[in-house]
Amino acid sequence: MIFPMTLNRLTRELEAAGIEDAAFEARLICARFTGVTEAKLLSEPDAELQGSDELALAVSRRLAREPLQYVLGEWEFMGLPFDVSDKCLIPRADTELLCETAIIYLPHGGRMLDLYTGSGCIAVSCAHYRPDAVVSALEKYPGALESAKKNAEKNGVSVGFIEADVNDPAAVTGEYDVIVSNPPYVTAEEMETLAPELSFEPREALTDGGDGLSFYRSIVKIYPAHLAAGGTLAFEHGAAQGEAVRQIVREAGYVPETLFDLGGHERVTLFHTKTYTEK
């Protein structure tokens, strides 16, 4: 425990640990574990805060570079609260573009499938903002699936969960108007250079252990058969993977379209069944 605990003292300790946005994180940690509002913390940054074992543990975890989201236990995505744990990938703002894309292309009363649902952030958000739709979500790992179910309950939405391997051609039946996926796409090489925080997230949710593209190849091979006429399949991918993913889509006989995130990076590639080209 840093003693005496003050907002300014914690900010300096986080900075010394190499954490970016130390002031922002210090406010969130102090507010979460002391009950003091951020406004009061900012007005009295050198005021000594009431210590507790819970606060001390949170500080030690973050100084050890455990992700802030895991330390807080909750994170916001699409304006909704999501419980997070090391059983699933942390919801990221970049993924909101994929979620928004699904919401746009999902027809009224349509059916949507989220592959590699993880925390459930995409499926739950779509179910929240499109209550007219029927939303399903597929996840292989029981721990992540349990997190997704809890987040659906937390946000009061109905999602049909499927425990299965995305690579299994028999994993799902029926047709969907929109299928989305944020698969593991970090390459094995990139995994060796990631920030310390990434080592706390489940490796299987980050990488395929190879070139980062194997799941796109598998999904494009299996899931167009489950798209309704005029349906849409959309992926999130890394900022440098846009052309590689587009090529996978082209080789399957479809016409890809890539969308840019707020940072100006290629982030989501999609295609529609109506643009299928007969060979």
Image (cartoon, grey):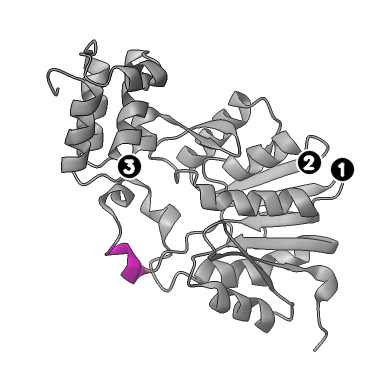
Disc 2 secondary structure class? strand
Q: Give the prevailing secondary structure in the magenta stretch.
A: helix
**Disc 2/disc 3 C-alpha distance (Å):** 39 Å
User: Mark 3 sits on what residue?
Assistant: 21
Q: Where residue 97 sits: x, y (%)?
A: 62, 53
Mark positioned earlier in the residue sequence (1 or 3): 3
Residue ID at (58%, 41%): 121
The type of residue carrying mark 2 is Val
* Amino acid marked by disc 3: Asp
**Closer to us: 132 or 144:** 132
Percent of width and height locating residue 176 = 79, 54
Q: Which mark is residue 109?
A: 1
Q: Which residues are magenta?
A: 188-193
Dot 2 and dot 1 residues touching (CB under 8 Å): yes
Residue at point 62%, 62% (across, down): 235
Kind of residue indicated by mark 1: Gly
- The relative height of residue 277 versus residue 72 in the rendered view (above or below) is below
Q: Earlier in the sequence, mark 2 or mark 3?
A: 3
- Alpha carbons under labels 1 and 3: distance apart: 42 Å
Percent x, y of residue 1: 14, 22
- Left or right: residue 184 versus residue 78 is left
x and y percent of residue 85 in the render? 41, 35
Task: Write the residue at 65% across / 45% down.
Answer: 137
**Outermost bottom residue:** 279
- Mark 2 residue crowding within 10 angstroms, few (<14) / some (14–19) / many (20+): many
Q: How many marks?
A: 3
Given residues 48 and 91, the one toward you in this image is 48
Residue position for label 2: 134
Q: Using the image as rendered, state which of residue 13 and residue 253 is in the foreground.
A: 13
